[in-house]
Image: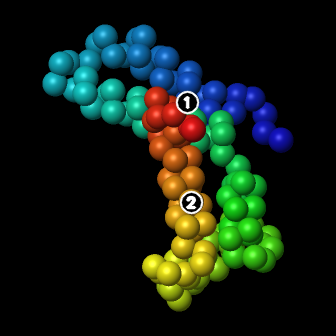
Amino acid sequence: MNDRPRGDELLATARTVIREQLLPLVSKEHKRDVLMVMNAMSIAERQLRGCEPDDPEQVKGLEQLLEQSFADLASASKVFVQFIREGGADPGQPKRGQTFDWLRASVRRKLVESNPKVRAD
């Protein structure tokens, strides 16, 4: 267990300082750059707040799709890549729909993480 403040809390504090104290001092030509940096910090903050190194949902989804157990997301991903390379998701294959469902869900999670205005459902 990490001491506080955690990484996400540090990023939130840094963004507040930038927004309230530094942004008003930045020239017009550099404001966009500062706003992009703040947006990147927001994304990193959400990733730190909601991310586990091995997302159990992703591992479970790949276990169901590939019909085997995995110790972690990295090993599941390697098997998944091989499954796709070998044509397991090609047209006419029985797991094609399930593969695309898993991929859509994975992309949706990433979109919600990088842009919270995107609906999770």
Q: In which quarter of the view is residue 34 placed?
A: top left
The residue lying toward the viewer, choosing from 113 and 22, is: 113
Picture layout, residue 11 above or below residue 105? above
Secondary structure beneath dot 2 equals helix
Picture layout, residue 67 above or below residue 23? below
The residue lying toward the viewer, choosing from 27 and 89, is: 89
| Residue positioned most to the left | 29
Query: Which residue is at 78% across, 77% downward?
Result: 68
Q: Is residue 50 left or right of residue 104?
A: right
Label of residue 11 in the image:
1
The residue lying toward the viewer, choosing from 96 and 85, is: 96
Colour pattern of the rendering: rainbow
Residues marked 2 and 1 touching at CB (< 8 Å)? no
Query: Which residue is at 54% across, 73% downward?
Result: 96
Query: Which residue is at 37% across, 33% downward?
Result: 37
Q: Residues within 10 Å of mark 2 (few under 14, many from 20)?
A: few
- Which of pointers 2 and 1 lies earlier in the amino acid sequence? 1
Name the residue tied to disc 2.
101
Q: Position of residue 73 (x, y in %)?
A: 69, 65
Mark 2 is on which residue type? Answer: Asp
Q: Position of residue 111 (x, y in %)?
A: 48, 44
Mark 1 is on which residue type? Answer: Leu
Q: Position of residue 82 (x, y in %)?
A: 57, 84
Q: Residues within 10 Å of mark 1 (few under 14, many from 20)?
A: many
Secondary structure beneath dot 1 equals helix
Query: Which residue is at 80% across, 74% downward?
Result: 69
Q: CA distance from mark 2 to mark 1?
A: 33 Å
Picture layout, residue 12 above or below residue 80? above
| Residue positioned most to the right | 1
Q: In the rendered image, which quarter contains the C terminus?
A: top right
Picture layout, residue 49 above or below residue 100? above
